[in-house]
Amino acid sequence: MPRVLLIVLFLLIEATALCSGAEPKVEVFPAAPYDRHIIYQALIFFWIGIIGLIVIIAMKLREIKRVQNMGIDEEEKNAPFLD
Amino acid sequence: MEALGALARMKTVPSHRFDAWYFAGGLTLFLFVFQFITGMALALYYVPHAEHAHKSIIDIVTKLNMGWLFRSLHHWGAQLAILILFVHVFSTLLLKAYRKPRELVWFTGFVMLAISIFFGLSGYFLLWDERAFAAVRVATGGAGNLPLAGWLIKGFLRGGLDVTGETLTRFYAFHVAILPLVTIAVTGLHVLLVQLHGMSVPLSQEEKQGRPEPFFPNLFYKDLIVWLVCLGVVVTLAVLFPPEIGRKADPLAPAPENIKPEWYFLFLFQTLKLFPGEMLGMNGETIAIVLISAAILFFLLIPFFDRRSAMGQRSPLFTWIGVFYLVYFTVMTVIGFLT
């Protein structure tokens, strides 16, 4: 008896879904919790990498500006050659 | 290469209060390259056929390793590219960077904006879901309302009387072959002209500008920082908000309710809503399309109308016109988004 009830219930649900024209929504993002965890973790590491690169470039830029302000970044044209 | 290196070392960039707006141009270029790379990866698996297009995108997203990420990156890269391009265009307009002798720079920039919007529309349609289908039907139908050449443009875009599988083939050709080639040519010309004329300095800043900054390495490193932040933003948006995929398009089904176009078409959509069905015995939509086309044409020809700026004088009238365009675009987009 319970098995018959289950089958009837299943058929009812299927029929309702068919009548409403509902289609299963496409998963546009991995659904497994493990995959999600890995992706969010990778995103954090990605941002750490970006911030690290930005800090390095900003330090380099600061150094370049310091050298430019001192006026020693250009080669002197009349510098004697050492033979 | 040596000549290019020497050019990069010699090139300087003006330094003033508004020089941060210069980054918008470089950022747009970065996003275009980003779109080319992610688009090429997607094109390896996409099937441009009405029967298989929708399924192939579902396969890319659900079956391919990192497929969902590439699609999401391409989607968000496109949104940001168009947004930054709008910022670039409006900053150029308000800083009067279009003034003589840079009229052609403005013109090529405007063409790039038009191409980008068509890129967005054609790319959206490749999804072949019911929303994209309805959006393209409305957009091409709107183009058809243009007087004289409207029917020709509509027929050319659709590849027939209505939006069908033929339209998909056409839009695919536009999206992956024609538009990229035109983009490369126009962007090349735009960058070349910018190098030829140099960066424009706003009239108000001509007396106040500081010592010019070398492009390499100073501005190049600053550009790199901006690009890295932008890359981070695109990746974050792609991970947190991957775009949905709707139901497969059915050309015979009615358009879904409460459908809205992409955000960069919302101001046009809202403007069309302001007009009644019939005005002065004519089709209201036709009048709206003509007025919008006239406003866009005026926008394109602003460098030729703004004679005071061309002579190096201040022109507050055109500043107000620019502000009006910006406010109208923003307000209409927000209203379209909220309603």
Image (cartoon, helix red, strand yellow):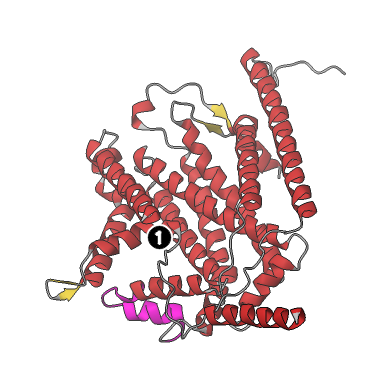
A49 in the magenta segment: no
Quarter holding residue B152: bottom left
Examine the rendering and report whether any part of residue B46 can be seen: no
* In this rendering, position of residue B95 left or right of residue B13: left
* Residue B100, above or below B116: above
Percent of width and height locating residue B120? 51, 62
Residue in the image at 77% along x and 15% along y: A80
Residue for badge 1: B265
Percent of width and height locating residue B292? 28, 61
Q: Residue furthest top?
A: A70
* In this rendering, position of residue B303 left or right of residue B81: left
Closer to the camera, A40 or A67?
A40
Q: Chain of mark 1?
A: B
- Provide the major secondary structure of the magenta segment: helix
* Residue B289, above or below B51: above
- Could you classify mark 1 by the number of other residues whose Cα lies within 10 Å: few (under 14), some (14-19), or many (20 or more)? some
Highlighted range, magenta: B143-160
Percent of width and height locating residue A29? 68, 59
Quarter holding residue B209: top left
Kind of residue indicated by mark 1: Phe
Residue in the image at 48% along x and 39% along y: B198
Q: Residue furthest left?
A: B280
Q: Residue furthest front?
A: A1
Percent of width and height locating residue B103? 37, 49
Query: If the image is split into quadrants, where does the C terminus of chain A sit?
Result: top right
Closer to the camera, B162 or B3?
B162
Residue in the image at 63% along x and 52% along y: B238
Query: If the image is split into quadrants, where does the N terminus of chain A sit?
Result: bottom right
Q: Residue furthest right?
A: A83
* Residue B63, above or below B110: below
Closer to the camera, B134 or B113?
B134
